[in-house]
Image (spheres, rainbow, N blue to C red):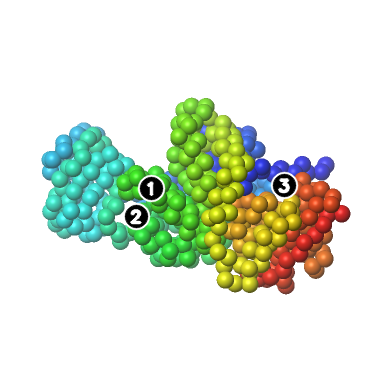
Amino acid sequence: MARIPLRRRRRTKIVATLGPASASAEVIAKLFHAGADVFRLNFSHGSHEDHAARIATIRELERRTGRPIGILADVQGPKLRVGRFAAGRVSLQTGQTFRLDLNPTPGDARRVQLPHPEILAAAGIGTTLLLDDGKLRLRVTHRRDDHLETEVVVGGPLSDRKGVNVPDVVLPIPALTAKDRDDLAFVLEKGIEYIGLSFVQRPEDVAEAREIAAGRALIMVKMEKPQAVENLDAIMALTDCVMVARGDLGVELPPEEVPLIQKRIVRAARAAGKPVVVATQMLESMITAPSPTRAEASDVATAVFDGADAVMLSAETAAGQYPYEAVNMMDRIVARVEQDGGWRQLTDNSRPPPEPTSAGAIAAAARQVASTIHAKAICTFTSTGSTTLRVARERPDCPIIGLTASAETARRMAVVWGVHPLVASEPHSMSDMVTKAQRVALTEGFANSGDEVVVTAGVPFGTPGTTNALRVAALK
């Protein structure tokens, strides 16, 4: 039976997080058909057995549909938390003193354990500590080797094991914990496309993860610390993709800064030609409601206007009551924005200058030629994905068909803006390349007889990073 082409009617991709609400093969298939291009596995929750079952389900779905599907393994990173309280919870009053120490004895309204000597060592007088996602704010007034004396600046209830954020200082804590290393060893054996890297502060954190991945997966840095934003250029140079993780950013930075940082990160990623995902609270109300607020719809639209490669759903699909509706709604919002003339104009106006290389020039020329002749698609042949990424950086008017002999590369392109990835045999000549491109454009429903497509590749074929060939082909 001939495969029915399944193609998206939008360029911006959708990442959906799997969890208790979306664990079954039936729901995962529904989310894919509703619009999910990449599935995120959150290693803060669930066992290795749970994640292995979901990976197997996704691969079976991929086999049935003939469409590459990306998998993002998001590792937890270090979680900084206070200890426990004798009564389970206390109430801190604004203006009172409160001690954080290394003593494991359950705490009370005057003190609690902070089992992180690194924080005690790095903090100074005036350092701000945020507790419970920023609901409580403490300021360090005295510092000793074994404790910090603080003043409660913003009080409130505090219970066992609530999180601690330290926005003011770089903490000497590696981004990968022993648990993360175990999770990576497990998941890299299974074959996934992206590693979500939490708690990144410095470029060295990215280098460590790259060494462990050893090319088996792409690194997606989660920008969630102020220190990472300060080191944006150096981190961008080392990572493969980036995520604007607005939840933690919003805890450690004033809320009014987060939209500006989102735009800055998206711009930097676009200039570097690296995929960027905007995440967290995009359709948050759909965890418990079948439709979003109008503000949430506008938030998704803003990310699309900014030029993000992908937008992400977290608890909406992992634990919400309406996972299918959330993906369907995001698909509808993205598709509608991309039909707007203002979106195309903004996309064109914000295009970064071509990379000053022959490969960058060819990619820019492919977009220009496709626009001039109203080509139905740009077909890219790639071994590692670099040719396709360069063309996607140009944000062409027409769809990009990313052809590769590698199933791994095809899956990695699932997060990239505008790309319809497909596995195809390696072309053995320029005429074979053109013939394959024509056939795929027809069979995948992108073009009809008489239409034109632009074809680009690196020659000799199979040599990574050599985008140097451009052809225009009319479909017979």
Say which element carries label 1: helix
The answer to the question of whether label 3 and label 2 lie on touching residues, with beta carbons closer than 8 A, is: no
> Which residue is painted at 24% across and 48% down in the image?
129
Furthest residue in direction top, as rendered: 289
Q: Which residue is rendered at x = 61% and y = 55% of the image?
A: 395
What amino acid type should be assigned to the residue bearing mark 1? Val
* Residue 427 in the image, given as x and y percentages of width and height: 78, 64
Task: Name the spot of residue 208 as percent of width and height, x first.
Answer: 44, 64
> Residue beneath label 1, please?
258
Q: Measured along the vertical axis of the image, is residue 100 above or below residue 89?
A: below
**Residues at marks 2 and 1 touching, judged by CB atoms closer than 8 Å:** no
Residue 421 is labelled as none
Q: Residue at x 83, y 42 (%)?
A: 1
Outermost right residue: 476
Q: Is residue 37 above or below residue 428?
A: above
Lower position in the chain sequence, tag 2 or tag 1: 2
Amino acid type assigned to the residue bearing label 3 in the image: Gly
Placement of 110 over or under 393, stated as above or below: above
Mark 3 lies on residue: 66
Q: CA distance from mark 2 to mark 1?
A: 10 Å
- Mark 1 to mark 3 CA distance (whole Å): 39 Å
Kind of residue at badge 2 = Pro
**Local secondary structure at mark 3:** loop
User: Can residue 460 be seen?
Assistant: yes
Q: Which residue is mark 2?
A: 226
| Quadrant in which the C terminus is drawn | bottom right
For discs 3 and 2, the disc positioned in front in the rendered view? 2
Q: Position of residue 350 (x, y in %)?
A: 53, 55
Q: Nearer the viewer, mark 1 or mark 3?
A: 1
